[in-house]
Amino acid sequence: MTIIKTEFLLALNQVATERGISPEDVLSSIEAAIVAAYKREYPKEMEEELIAKVSKETGETKILKNEVDITPPGFGRIAAQTAKQVILQKIREAEKKTVAAHYQSQIGSLLKGRVIRYDGFNAYVDIGKTEAILPKEEQIRNEQYQVNDSVLVYLKEISQDKFGNPRIIISRADPRLIKELFKREVPEISNNTVVIKKVVREPGERSKIAVTTTTGGVDPVGACVGQKGARKQSGRKLQLMKRKLHLP
């Protein structure tokens, strides 16, 4: 009984190639899912050792028990739907891995994002290609998050949830956010003329940075806040930092 046509297998190969998925891996997952679907339809076979075989050449699919074909009439529709669901799932998984790989190289950098929801504990932020999680412990104390708020965040890490899906973790409280912000705003830091040695931060309250220089004749503090004694320039610089961070 043919339940997956050859044309479908050709399409499968095309999709697998475009998405970077192994066709063999997809077929193996389809076979396992078809067995599970069969056992749901026929609970009496739940404890039996069954396998499904999908022919790569013809697309013919069989349910085998002790190497005997027991595929029931009319099972083709269920198997075809199951195959479609598995392929869509594999495509989604591949897309998630691609997105995770894209952001893997950006760990430790600043990203602009938009709050898309807040559950009272975690905030979820659209960072472009996907959404990232801003956990409670990475938030600034007393900072409020409203849908569509723009936020500047630090990409802290990429982990996995219990299902193996990538979780992109961002932070507003990490001291390295301040360091990266100064690197972005102060040319002497970005070109390593001035080096940040340490950042001490009380998120939402105050931040202190220790700086030094690799070049004689350069005032590292003055480079960060403007010329010595020039309060107006220093104030503009600090206000710029606050606006970038959306701090009070």
Image (cartoon, rainbow, N blue to C red):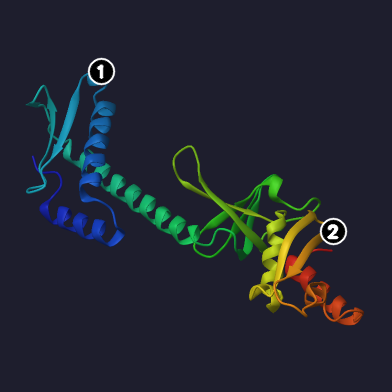
Q: Where is residue 72 in the image (x, y as percent from the top left)?
A: 13, 30
Q: Is residue 97 left or right of residue 247?
A: left
> Disc 2 versus disc 1: distance between alpha carbons?
63 Å
Q: Position of residue 162 (x, y in %)?
A: 48, 37
Which amino acid type is marked by label 2? Arg
Instruction: Identify whether 59 is placed above or below 51.
Output: below
Q: What element carries label 1?
A: loop
Which label belongs to residue 135? none
The three-letter code of the residue at mark 1 reads Glu
Left or right of 115: which side holds 47? left
- Find disc 2 in the rendering and name its residue: 206
Residue 13 in sight from this viewpoint: yes
Choose between 50 and 170: the one closer to the eye.
170
Q: Which residue is rendered at x = 53% and y = 65% of the image?
A: 128
Label 2 Cα neighbours within 10 Å, binned few <14 / some 14-19 / many ≥20: few
Q: What element carries label 2?
A: strand
Instruction: State the residue at coordinates (77%, 55%).
Output: 144
